Image: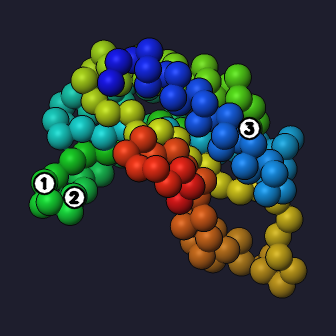
Amino acid sequence: MSVERQLKEQFAENLEIVDALLADGSEPDAEYTIEHHFSATNFDRLEKAAVDAFKLGFEVNDAEEMELEDGSIIFCFDAIAKHKLEVPLLDKACEQLIQLAAKQKVDYDGWGTYFVGDEVEGDEEDDEFEYDEFEDDEYEDDNDSDDKFH
């Protein structure tokens, strides 16, 4: 897919995801942790992409090795930013990162974040447990499937 087409689709999905989160009651003025996902079969290319993302101001986590359903191995990392859930900020970051991915010949696999809202009464004493328990409620763009929210 061309970079231009990928950007156009990503921008539309950014708006869709933000609208869905806010419609579900997520806090509009909160600071969100946005995780932009990258993957590649070539570790050296992925490492160069991680360095480039860091130079752009993103926090970069350690690369992980994953085995796919077909038995093949890929490497992945997240480029992390913290900011308000605003479409122009997401569009700018996605444009930078999609172009970075094209330059380094790795895959940009979209972004994800977590719902930010009122905590359920009685769950306040153990935030770490709450995070782990609800980790699967991540709203995420996944360019490889029609299911927009995971």
The picture places residue 11, in percent across and down from the top left corner, at: 59, 27
The picture places residue 29, in percent across and down from the top left corner, at: 86, 41
Relative to 139, residue 108 above or below: above
For the residues labelled 3 and 2, the Cα–Cα distance comes to 31 Å
- Residue 1 is labelled as none
Q: Name the residue tied to disc 3.
A: 85
Element at badge 1?
loop
Identify which amino acid the numbered label 3 is placed on.
Leu
Q: Contact, CB < 8 Å: mark 1 with mark 3?
A: no
Asked which quadrant contains residue 41, the reply is: top left
Element at badge 2?
loop
For the residues labelled 2 and 1, the Cα–Cα distance comes to 5 Å
How many numbered discs? 3
Instruction: Classify mark 3: residues with Cα within 10 Å, few (<14), some (14-19) or many (20+).
Output: many
Which comes before the other along the chain, label 3 or label 2?
Answer: 2
The picture places residue 79, in percent across and down from the top left corner, at: 47, 36
Identify which amino acid the numbered label 1 is placed on.
Ser
Q: Is residue 74 visible?
A: yes
User: Could you tell me which residue is drawn at 71 percent across and 41 percent down?
Assistant: 18
User: Could you tell me which residue is drawn at 67 percent across and 74 percent down?
Assistant: 130
Q: Is residue 96 left or right of residue 17?
A: left
Q: Residue furthest bottom?
A: 122
Q: Name the residue tied to disc 2.
A: 68
Q: Name the residue tied to disc 1.
A: 72
User: Could you tell me which residue is drawn at 32 percent across and 33 percent down?
Assistant: 107
Identify which amino acid the numbered label 2 is placed on.
Leu
Element at badge 3?
loop
Which comes before the other along the chain, label 1 or label 3?
Answer: 1
